[in-house]
Amino acid sequence: MDLLVLRHGEAGKRSPSPGDSKRTLTAEGRQEIVDLSNGLKHLEVQLDYILTSPLLRAKNTAEIVAKSLKYKGKIEELDVLKPEGSRLEFYSALSKLKRESVVLVVGHEPYLSEMISEAISQSDCRIDLKKAGLARIRVLSILPKLKGDLRWLLTPKLLKKMS
């Protein structure tokens, strides 16, 4: 399995907690994701699954990528991909997917960076996934914890240059 881990694009200003889930991408954030999607098209990435946090900024990000890559499947929203979600529950959901698939996961910090670090390192390792940043992990095992090899760690600027 190849796991593409994508942090949502730039979102509007933080507001008090109840409004946080409704923050949408800014115009700049949308453009970052369009540029990223063009980079993925250039790399001829074809997705089998898209899994996203239900927060609006992550859903917006997933929708832009899906449209750009002409993804035919359903975008699945998973509560376990919320910032406070359980990575162990996410790994359980991931284990139910086909082993030879390409999965895009869209979410938030620090959840994604911690997941990447845990997957690729046996010791303390810190990955900083920027907004609209993308990592690719070749998954070796999923349960009890995700383990794999880091194949890409791409910034939005680099992805824009690739498009």
Image (cartoon, rainbow, N blue to C red):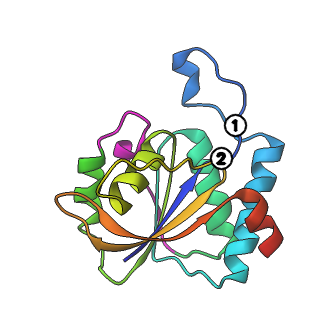
Which residue is identified by label 1? 11
Q: Nearer the viewer, mark 1 or mark 2?
A: 2
- Amino acid tagged 1: Ala
User: The magenta stretch spans which residues?
Assistant: 73-86
Q: Nearer the viewer, residue 84 or 126?
A: 126
Query: What residue is rendered at 67% in x and 68% in y?
Result: 67
Query: What residue is rendered at 24% in x and 68% in y?
Result: 96
- Amino acid tagged 2: Lys
Residue 76 rendering spot, x and y as whole percentages: 43, 58
The quadrant in which the N terminus is found is bottom left
Q: Is residue 79 magenta?
A: yes
Residue 149 rendering spot, x and y as whole percentages: 40, 72
In the rendered view, does 53 fall on the left or right side of 92?
right
Q: Is residue 163 visible?
A: no
Depicted 112 relative to depicted 95: above or below: above
Residue 155 rendering spot, x and y as whole percentages: 69, 58
Query: What residue is rendered at 56% in x and 81% in y?
Result: 46
Check the image and name the residue furthest to the front: 123
Image quadrant where residue 152 sits: bottom right
In the rendered view, does 20 fall on the left or right side of 30?
left
Sequence-wise first label, 1 or 2: 1
In the rendered view, does 19 fall on the left or right side of 24?
left
Image quadrant where residue 2 sits: bottom left
Q: Residues within 10 Å of mark 2 (few under 14, many from 20)?
A: many
Residue 131 is tagged as 2
Depicted 37 relative to depicted 10: above or below: below
Q: Residues within 10 Å of mark 1 (few under 14, many from 20)?
A: many
Numbered disc 1: secondary structure: loop
